[in-house]
Amino acid sequence: MDSKFYTASTQVKQNLTRRSAGILRFGLVFLVVVAQVAVIFFLVQVVHTRALPLYFIIQGIAVIDIFILTGKRQNASFTMAWVILILLLPVSGHILYILWGRRTKHKRIRRTLARTNPYLVKDPAVYQALSEAHPRRKRLAGYLGRMGFPAYQGTSCTYYPLGDVQFPAMLADIEQAKKFIFLEYFIIGQGELWTELREILARKAAEGVEVRVMYDDFGSLITLPRNLEADLKSLGIQVTAWGPIHYSISRLYINYRNHQKICVIDGDIAYTGGTNLADEYINVNSKLGHWKDTAIRIEGDAVWSHTVFFLQMWEAQTKQEQDLDKYRPTRQGKAAPGFYQPFSDGPMNNPYNPAEITYRSMVNNAREYVYITSPYLIIDNSMTDALCTAALGGTDVRIITPRKWDRWFVHMATQSNYDALLRAGVKLYEYAPGYIHAKTILSDDDHCIIGTINMDYRSFYLHYENAVWMCGTPVIKTIKADFERTLLECEEIELAKWQKRPWRMRLYQSFFRIFAIFF
């Protein structure tokens, strides 16, 4: 038998086995969730027929909870979706809200942040320099600073317009690691990229370099390489899965995912952006056409925040206290133009979410233009109003979303926002060659954000995210040029044509817009 055919056949069988195992795990969790809902509806029916007074008492409590819910300072879309559900199903909907709708306190990560945030020390001299060089941006920098995220100088940055370009550079840097390698990604997928990366990590671990890998259990459920944990541990590599999907199903913790994407090498170099460790991000075996994503490489002082972000998430998941001083950078950052302010976000911040607030602040303060790329555009009224007000005020607002989608119902929710934005003069484009996964917001040639943050409810409220706000950096010119090149590959959505879309599509979009927070 031909050896190449045998190898390919074996690989296909392993992939099918891996996917089947992931689908089975997800199926079991899904069945448990469905069973919970079924039990709730059954018990409610029993109470309704055999204990009517109790049924009315629960209804009364539900009404009180609606008033409490609407009185809380939280996202309006979240509130509206749950109020509608409770009104439609006064008892069952109320019980589901008690189980799944109330905010979890995320005590473990709060304790971790309280212990480790003092390691993120703000330098007043940097803020003074930023305020003098960019007085219009000192307010945003000050906000992020008060949220616990320092601004840095002494940092250089390289921008990658595609994962195809990023990963060769990243693998080359990993090859040069001397002390440690930290990898934190939402998705790890079996394929060419992982095979090459695994070989390098194995060599570095054998040389005595400390290697840690963290992935999101739900994000990697179907794609995870077979026996990953056992394999990496056998190579001397530390590995952990964030938020196992079977954990606290009764509270639906499955909603709170680790969407961060961080690579740190020796504390001196960090990579972040939209890319994951899977082949579609290098345009190999992409089912959605050309995969457009972006990332940055930073070197210097701002890397320290990424080291801290990684260790915070590692400690929160493993419950093992980390010695952060052990991972201080080995090189001092060199003088370089511009300012860098890495920040992270998560559901423990609700309702004060740095990701959403920085995005909205950039839109509100844009004078000439604001350019955005995002695979999703599932936004609430406050963000919609900010974008519309900016466009009506004469700001050039342009947003690129995908033409091809990974999930149809999410695409419908994205398109549900088109009408209001187009009417206000926002220019919308869909990336025609394939799927755009890049998460970027850029404004007025002097500041931008690149990271893991989508323009959607999940990124702003449910997921753990990270990004870098950059101000006055030379790389901004490169990022803008890439956005303008990408526009040439997009199809602009015209209001007159959009208003002629079929009524069925309008219905789907309206429905999924209301309940977008549930998916």
Image (cartoon, rainbow, N blue to C red):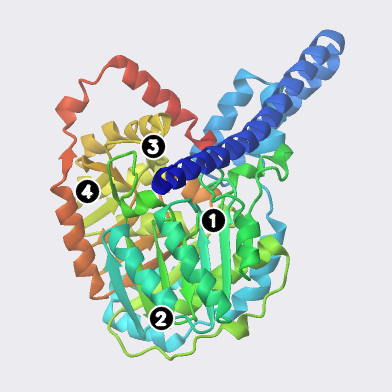
Which of disc 3 and disc 4 is earlier in sequence? 4
As helix, strand or loop, the secondary structure at mark 2 comes to loop
Three-letter code for the amino acid on which mark 1 is drawn: Tyr
Within-10-Å neighbours for mark 2: few <14, some 14–19, many 20+: many
Q: Is residue 51 toward the left or the right of residue 274 in the image?
A: right
Q: Using the image, tell me which numbered label, if any, was put on residue 398.
A: 4
What residue is shown with label 1?
464
Q: Using the image, tell me which numbered label, if any, was put on residue 498.
A: none
Of badges 4 and 1, the one in the foreground is 1
Distance CA(mark 1)–CA(mark 3): 21 Å
Three-letter code for the amino acid on which mark 2 is drawn: Tyr
As helix, strand or loop, the secondary structure at mark 1 comes to loop
Outermost residue toward the front in this view: 1
Examine the image and state in which quarter residue 193 appears. bottom left
Q: Percent x, y for residue 111?
A: 70, 66
The residue positioned 38% from the left and 56% from the top of the image is 359
Distance CA(mark 2)–CA(mark 1): 22 Å
The answer to whether residue 276 of the structure is visible from this angle is yes
